[in-house]
């Protein structure tokens, strides 16, 4: 397979070229959440805004996105029907979960990975001193059919002029918009439905769903560190696998695969060479390498270099492996 630099550049989303959307979700006017920037990199993601820019529309069985937030900015409580995995590209972040966001929390630093299980409400905030960015992987081509918001988030949004329709579209009364005829507002979950969500303590959550960057780097000494897979550091089968590569991880830096492969640079600069061209990737760059293309992947300079690699699998996108029952009760997680 011969592909030119121009062919491949269309498959690279440079960090500096990312186009933000500031009205992507229902909490876009809610104080404390109104400075968020949402980025849809590969696939349509779960944005509720009609003007969300999508960099690469073709999905490889999952979606890639990002969230950028200034200090003290928060993403409101929500849940998904498929996997939601983050790694911290920059900054210091607090993730919290539970029906009111008070069941547990964990602080993540640069390079840390969190695989938030389906079936619990989650939120996150930048607790650092500078603008920060987290990169996201969402399971499924349609990212699970959208976001399910906690009832209080919907109420707060309505108080600040935003209404989410049953069609998944946001309407902003501050712009003179209203629900179209025949479109009802998105209903809130009632008390009985909320009672089905489990209680997950920090002690139970962290060992199963959080992987620290330097632990991952240590495991990537002679081979790629498998972060998310059936036998990975975080055991799950969300329709994709996640591993980390550093200098010395690949015994054979020239290889090919029949899988879609997304390269997401964490640290350093990386050279990707193929018959017909070459690209240099910097931190925050995302490269959708097509199946069947022989490529050579190496750090392009000395110093710390790492990248996360995402591949599609034969597993269907669906609930996190941790849940053994489809509707866990409001009880301790086990």
Image (cartoon, grey):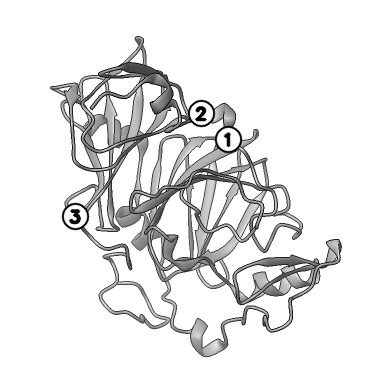
Q: Position of residue 246 (x, y in %)?
A: 28, 25
Which is nearer the eye, 222 or 137?
137
Secondary structure under badge 3? Answer: loop
Left or right: where 327 falls relative to 187: left
Q: Quadrant of the C terminus?
A: bottom left
Q: Position of residue 82 (x, y in %)?
A: 38, 64
Separation of residues labelled 1 and 2 (CA atoms): 7 Å
> Looking at the image, how many numbered discs can be counted on the residues?
3
Which is nearer the eye, 322 or 239?
239
Left or right: where 118 falls relative to 28: left
Q: Residue at x 35, y 16 (%)?
A: 278
Residue located beneath label 2 in the image = 14
Mark 3 and mark 2 lie on one chain; the one further toward the N terminus is: 2
Q: Please determine whether, in this image, residue 299 is positioned above or below residue 320.
A: above
Q: Position of residue 171 (x, y in %)?
A: 74, 67
Mark 1 and mark 3 lie on one chain; the one further toward the N terminus is: 1
Indicate the quadrant where residue 10 lies.
top left
Q: Please determine whether, in this image, residue 160 is positioned above or below residue 64.
A: below
Residue located beneath label 1 in the image = 18
Residue located beneath label 3 in the image = 230
């Amino acid at each position: 397979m011969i592909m030119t630099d121009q062919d491949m550049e269309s498959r690279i989303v440079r960090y500096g070229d990312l186009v933000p959307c500031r009205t992507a979700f229902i909490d876009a006017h809610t104080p404390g959440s109104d400075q968020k920037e949402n980025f849809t990199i590969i696939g349509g993601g779960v944005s509720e805004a009609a003007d969300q820019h999508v960099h690469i529309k073709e999905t490889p069985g999952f979606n890639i996105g990002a969230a950028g937030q200034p200090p003290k900015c928060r993403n409101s409580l929500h849940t998904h029907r498929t996997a939601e995995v983050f790694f911290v590209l920059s900054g210091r972040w607090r993730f919290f979960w539970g029906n009111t966001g008070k069941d547990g929390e964990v602080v993540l630093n640069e390079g840390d990975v969190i695989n938030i299980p389906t079936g619990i409400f989650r939120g996150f905030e930048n607790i650092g001193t500078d603008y920060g960015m987290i990169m996201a992987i969402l399971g499924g081509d349609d990212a699970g059919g959208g976001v399910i918001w906690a009832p209080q988030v919907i109420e707060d949004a309505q108080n600040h002029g935003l209404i989410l329709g049953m069609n998944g579209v946001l309407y902003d009364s501050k712009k003179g918009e209203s629900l179209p005829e025949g479109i009802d507002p998105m209903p809130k979950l009632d008390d009985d439905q909320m009672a089905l969500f489990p209680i997950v303590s920090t002690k139970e959550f962290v060992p199963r769903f959080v992987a620290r960057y330097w632990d991952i780097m240590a495991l990537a000494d002679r081979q790629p560190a498998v972060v998310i897979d059936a036998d990975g550091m975080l055991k799950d089968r969300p329709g994709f696998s996640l591993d980390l590569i550093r200098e010395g991880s690949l015994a054979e830096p020239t290889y090919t695969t029949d899988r879609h492969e997304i390269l997401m640079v964490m640290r350093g600069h990386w050279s990707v060479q193929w018959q017909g061209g070459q690209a240099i990737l910097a931190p925050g760059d995302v490269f959708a390498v097509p199946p069947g293309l022989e490529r050579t992947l190496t750090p392009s300079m000395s110093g710390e270099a790492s990248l996360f690699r995402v591949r599609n699998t034969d597993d269907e996108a669906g609930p996190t492996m941790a849940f053994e029952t489809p509707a866990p009760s409001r009880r301790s997680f086990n």
